[in-house]
Amino acid sequence: MSDILQGEGLVGLTEVEAAARRLAGVAVRTPLLPADVISEIAGANVRLKCESLQRAGSFKIRGAYNFVSQLSDEQVASGIITYSSGNHAQAVALSGKLRGVRAVVVMPTTAPKVKRDGAERLGAEVIYEGTTSLERRAKAEEIAEEQGLVIVPPFDHRHIIAGQGTVGLEIAREWPDVDLVLAPIGGGGLASGVAASIKRLLPAASS
């Protein structure tokens, strides 16, 4: 597997803005829509960033494509691989398709059919392994080592974080008066990226 250096320090706004340029024409600028019922309950102006309308079904394409697009032709000669329960798998499948390279995804045996079918429809080779993230990761690392594939991490790489940070970049530019931005946390890639954008562009806002 090719060694992709992580770099040092926190992901900065410059990296997020560079990711936005790479994602132009690839990721959709999703709408920031008023959530009337939630706003009424909360007593505040609440808006939702609708990443469910994003290509491949989630924000994951932002980080995956930002990572894959920075790999050299030599690095991706054999292909790319990832481990995921669904959303990142589909994002890597689409990224591989757009880059014109082989994409392999290791998914749990319990993965929802809609996500399995989605990854296959986007051209990925799907391999099923266990039910936990550790099992999937171990299998992906084994295959990557054997076949010379580059692992596209699901969240813990600065290129992934910078790509996800474009969500925050779009929010800040569209709603500069926002005072609180909430992001869900799984692996932390989205939350880290959004915080990187919001805290630098809108320092008075909480995230």
Image (cartoon, helix red, strand yellow):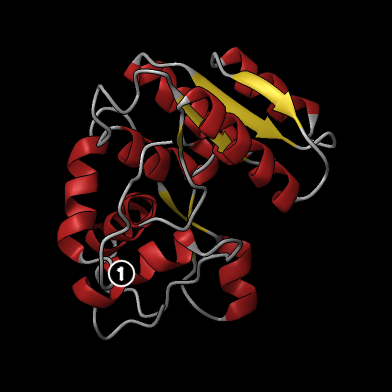
117 or 154, nearer to the observer: 154
Quadrant including the N terminus: top left
Q: Residue at x 22, y 59 (%)?
A: 173
- Residue at x 29%, y 54% (from the top left corner): 170
Q: Where residue 146 sits in the image (x, y, percent)?
A: 55, 27
Q: Disc 1 designates what residue?
A: 196
Residue 193 x %, y %? 37, 62
| Residue 151 sits above or below residue 143 on the image | below
Q: Quadrant of residue 99?
A: top left
Q: Is residue 111 left or right of residue 79?
A: right
Which residue shows up at 41% across the image and 77% down it? 207
**Is 146 or 16 nearer to us in this picture?**
146
Residue 73, how many percent across, how many down? 25, 22
- On screen, 196 above or below 150? below
Q: Is residue 52 visible?
A: yes
Residue 30 visible within the image = no
Report the front residue among 8 and 40.
8
Instruction: Give x and y (percent) for residue 93.
Output: 51, 25
Horizontally, residue 17 falls left or right of residue 1, namely: left
